[in-house]
Image (cartoon, rainbow, N blue to C red):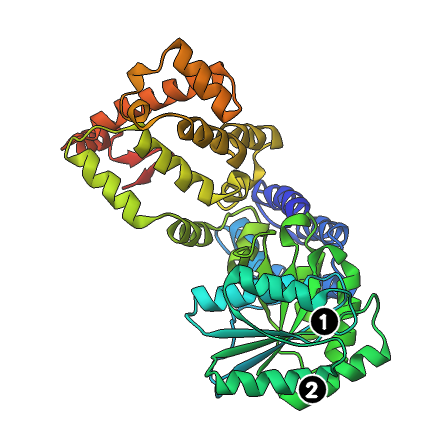
Amino acid sequence: MFDNLTDKLSKSIQKIRGQANLSEDNIKEALREVRIALLEADVALPVVKSFIDDIKVRALGTEVLTSLKPAQVLVKVVQEELVKVLGEATEGINFKAQPPVVILMAGLQGAGKTTTTGKLAKYLKERENKKVMVVSADVYRPAAIEQLQTVAEQVGVECHPSSVIDDPVTIGMTALQAAKKGYYDVLIVDTAGRLAVDEAMMKEIKSLQNSIQPSETLFVVDAMTGQDAANTAKAFSDALELTGVVLTKVDGDARGGAALSVKTITGKPIKYQGVGEKMEALEPFHPDRIASSILGMGDVLSLVEEVERKVDKKEAEKLAKKVAKGNKFTLEDFQSQLLQMQNMGDMTAMLDKIPGMSNLPDTIKDQVNDQAGSDITGKKIAVINSMTIKERRYPQLIKGSRKRRIANGSGTSIQDVSKLLKEFTQMQKMMRKLKGKGMMKMMQKLGGKMPGGMPF
């Protein structure tokens, strides 16, 4: 998300940084470009106007103009105002209520409520250690109930049965009683959407809200709808007592207008964002990190959290101990490393979280994905899977006929097999250098610095 906005804002900020002195004229020129960038990102006009006015007041004050480094201070001002627009604090589900905490999902049809219900259930189960039940109160959309049942099975949570002949209020009340009897921590109620906001829909969901008295009513909105998201958000905010927003399909939107509009329009925090199709692709919304990312400053904290969550620490420690003892690094170890890399997912998305990397040309990002993307990694894993146990432990045995058999078994070419063996040999040599005090020697050769000048 925000690709286009980041690009345009980074360029306008760069112009500010290039100024020896800031004046009212060059600040206004910079803010004019910021305004254009926001409008092109499909941010709602009232939000753009308020945002620019707030920056202008601070930018033309003594805070910036009398500073020793006015350009840097102005960048800081823009970042702080972005954080205000996005919501300032990171807010999750409020668990202070008596269990089960009831979460009502609201939004238009196609916004991704059912999928988000599953993602949120998985998130709360795995990261918050909660016992979760879900239920579908969508009695209109064909197969909506079956879809939620499938999603619930996929993420390993209980799905309370419901039927299209039932009333949504009855479904909600019955599920709530079942959640209480089963000592569930959380009940998530998926609701029906419509193609457009209509009175009947609002009346129905309002009745459901009044009946089950949810602790949280989350407005689920498609990030790709741009300014339309602001209009829909206003309608739902007027009809329901919203407590927060969930942005879906964030990974598919290059503009980001919805994120910068919906918080201001609803007055409610964006709590989560859907960042992919997989069930684990739901993340907390961190306004400060998003603001830094928009300005091309990266999001290192989120990157570290993602790596910690996705990397198998036990496997990593096991390999580290093995290498330190001088034990031989095998193709089985290499395969384990490839599986860890595959779990990391989209390498381009990870690059964007590193400061300065979001501005890399797409050609370079494509090259990174070509060399370390999940498809390439999957092909390498398939090659190793086609080897016998003996071949994995003694790769020097793999010659002509064996290469041909492995290539046929993995659906690759002999060249692919040879390339993997070469890569493994290079990795094996590197691992030998790490034996015993090899790690310290490598640090000394690097002059005590990591690539890029970062100290150990």
Whole-percent x and y of residue 299?
49, 51
Label 1: how many Cα within 10 Å (few below 14, some 14–19, many 20+): some
**Residue 390 sits above or below residue 397 on the image:** below
**Position of residue 283 in the picture relative to residue 389 (left or right):** right
Spatial CA span between label 2 and label 1: 32 Å
Q: Residue at x 46, y 83 (%)?
A: 183
Q: Secondary structure at mark 2?
A: helix
Rendering quarter of residue 370: top right
Whole-percent x and y of residue 374?
51, 36
Q: Which of 118 and 156 lies nearest the eye of the viewer?
A: 156
Q: Is any part of residue 307 visible from this angle? A: yes
**Position of residue 198 in the picture relative to residue 254 (left or right):** right
Q: Is any part of residue 56 visible from this angle? A: no
**Residue 268 sits above or below residue 355 on the image:** below
Q: Nearer the viewer, mark 2 or mark 1?
A: 2
Image mark for residue 265:
1
Q: Circle 2 is placed at which residue position?
A: 170
Label 2: how many Cα within 10 Å (few below 14, some 14–19, many 20+): some
